[in-house]
Amino acid sequence: MRPWIRDAKSLQLLVQSLVCVDSQQLCGSGLAVDGSGQLPSGKTFEDEQGLKQLLVDRKEQFAEALTEKLLTYATGRSMTFRDQADIKQVAAECGNSGYGLRDLVAGVVRSGIFRQR
């Protein structure tokens, strides 16, 4: 544990100070926050809205990636090539119902990968 987080109160204060960060300033300190970045594909964004738009433009790909991450966490193992068909099926079912997180989690729980863990 870092020396500046010695107890729960210190951690609470740290989290509260981080929560107030927005894309323009750091809670009245006058420090600008650089919200720009670049995805591995090379696409760039200037702020959180730009990142959101890039992800919305690739809903299917994002749903598949999130499905794989959720299944990896839920099963405690890495996904393999054999799991890709099930991952795509869960993501597609989620897409058919509007890409809701609740639908995605329910699909993960109903999947054969999760049930056979």
Image (spheres, helix red, strand yellow):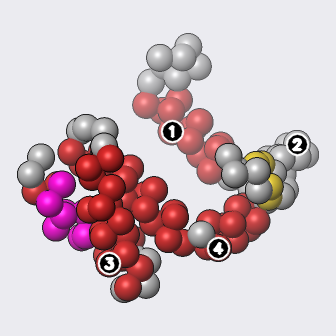
Q: Secondary structure at mark 1?
A: helix
Q: Nearer the viewer, residue 5 or 72?
A: 72
Q: Quick one: label 3 or label 2, which is nearer the N terminus?
A: 2
How many numbered dots are placed on residues in this image? 4
The residue segment tinted magenta is: 105-113
Task: Name the amino acid, label 2.
Answer: Leu
Question: Can you tell which of label 3 and label 1 is closer to the viewer?
Answer: 3
* Residue 62, x across and y down, in percent: 51, 63
Q: Residues within 10 Å of mark 1 (few under 14, many from 20)?
A: few
Tell me the residue that label 2 is attached to.
31
Asked if the residue under mark 1 is in contact with the one under mark 3, i.e. CB atoms within 8 Å, the reply is no
Label placed on residue 93: 3
Q: Residues within 10 Å of mark 3 (few under 14, many from 20)?
A: some
Does 64 appear in magenta? no
Task: Name the amino acid, label 3.
Answer: Glu
- Farthest residue in the top direction? 3
Q: Quick one: label 1 or label 2, which is nearer the N terminus?
A: 1
At 51% from the left and 33% from the top, the residue drawn is: 11
Q: Secondary structure at mark 4?
A: helix
Q: Secondary structure at mark 2?
A: loop
How far apart marks 4 and 3 lie (CA) works out to 18 Å
Q: In this image, 87 relative to 25: left or right?
A: left
Label placed on residue 37: none
Q: Secondary structure at mark 3?
A: helix
Does 107 appear in magenta? yes
How far apart marks 2 and 4 lie (CA) works out to 31 Å
Label placed on residue 12: 1
Q: Nearer the viewer, residue 82 or 52?
A: 82
